[in-house]
Amino acid sequence: GGVFANELLDNLPFRIVERTVEGWDEILVGLGPGGDLAEVRVRADDWLAHEVEDVVGSVPVGSRLPAQVGIDPWLRSCAAVLQRGFVVLVDYAASFEELARRQQQGWLRTYRAHERGTDPLQATGSQDITADVAREWLVRAAQRAGLQLVAEQSQAAWLGSLDLDALLDQARATWRERAHVGDLEALEARSAASEAEALTDPQGLGAHSVFILRR
């Protein structure tokens, strides 16, 4: 069998941690003096600190990172329904080192009405909150679930390996031939070409990472 997940992992539950001189703090959400939502810093529990320390490596004090605890049970559920097969994951992904350089404002994203949203502590319940996937956490979670990483590449490269370029050339040719007609076939060709270009744009969706796991 197979499981295909497009931009799913970045929506799974995650916790936020920050490296300190003594170890790791966790950033929670509570009420501020005026009753509004505000960050609350606590010492990370032993389990969370160990899980993070096991995969993060060396990042500077003050680095905030996502601890993507929701990935592990989801991958275990995938492995449980596959006797053999593949899990294909497409998502925003980066190393912990890169995420540390970006800081929280660079890897934590909010979306509302198909556009970038506001501060994650504002408009609660009416905007999505996502976090770029930490590559090291994902690879470890896959191994623990009994899944082997067999390929990792950009979305642009992966789609290219599936002969998307040939389909794109065909769509462009059809559009050139039938643009003056403007019939359904011509419009479908133009739409296919535009979609393919968007999916392979190295500055946009084409930069997504594709992870292929085998059971």
Image (cartoon, grey):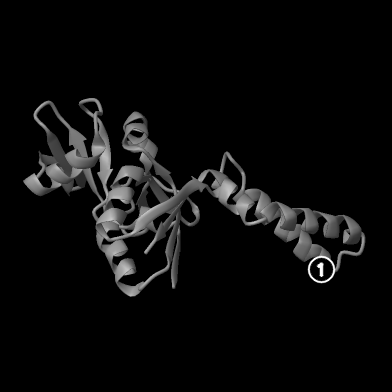
Q: Is residue 47 left or right of residue 54?
A: left
Of 67 and 3, nearer the camera is: 3
Amino acid type for the residue under numbered disc 1: Glu
Q: Could one spot residue 34 in this view of the protein?
A: no
Picture coordinates of residue 162 (x, y %)? Answer: 62, 57
Q: Position of residue 95 (x, y in %)?
A: 36, 38
Q: Quadrant of the N terminus?
A: bottom left
Dot 1, crowdedness within 10 Å: few (<14), some or many (≥20)?
some
User: Which residue is label 1 attached to?
Assistant: 185
Q: Quadrant of residue 43?
A: top left
Q: Picture quarter containing residue 171?
A: bottom right
The C terminus lies in which quarter of the figure?
A: bottom left
- Total of numbered circles in the picture? 1
In percent of the image, x 31 and y 55: which residue is there?
Answer: 142
Quadrant position of residue 8:
bottom left
Residue sitting at x 36%, y 59%: 126
Whole-percent x and y of residue 66? Answer: 27, 44
- Horizontal side of 170 relative to 133 (left or right) equals right
Can I make out residue 114 in this image? yes
Foreground of the two, 114 or 52: 52
**Front residue of 31 and 8:** 8
Q: Residue at x 7, y 45 (%)?
A: 46
Element under label 1?
Answer: helix
Q: Is residue 154 above or below residue 168?
A: above
Residue depicted at 71% across the width and 60% down the height:
192
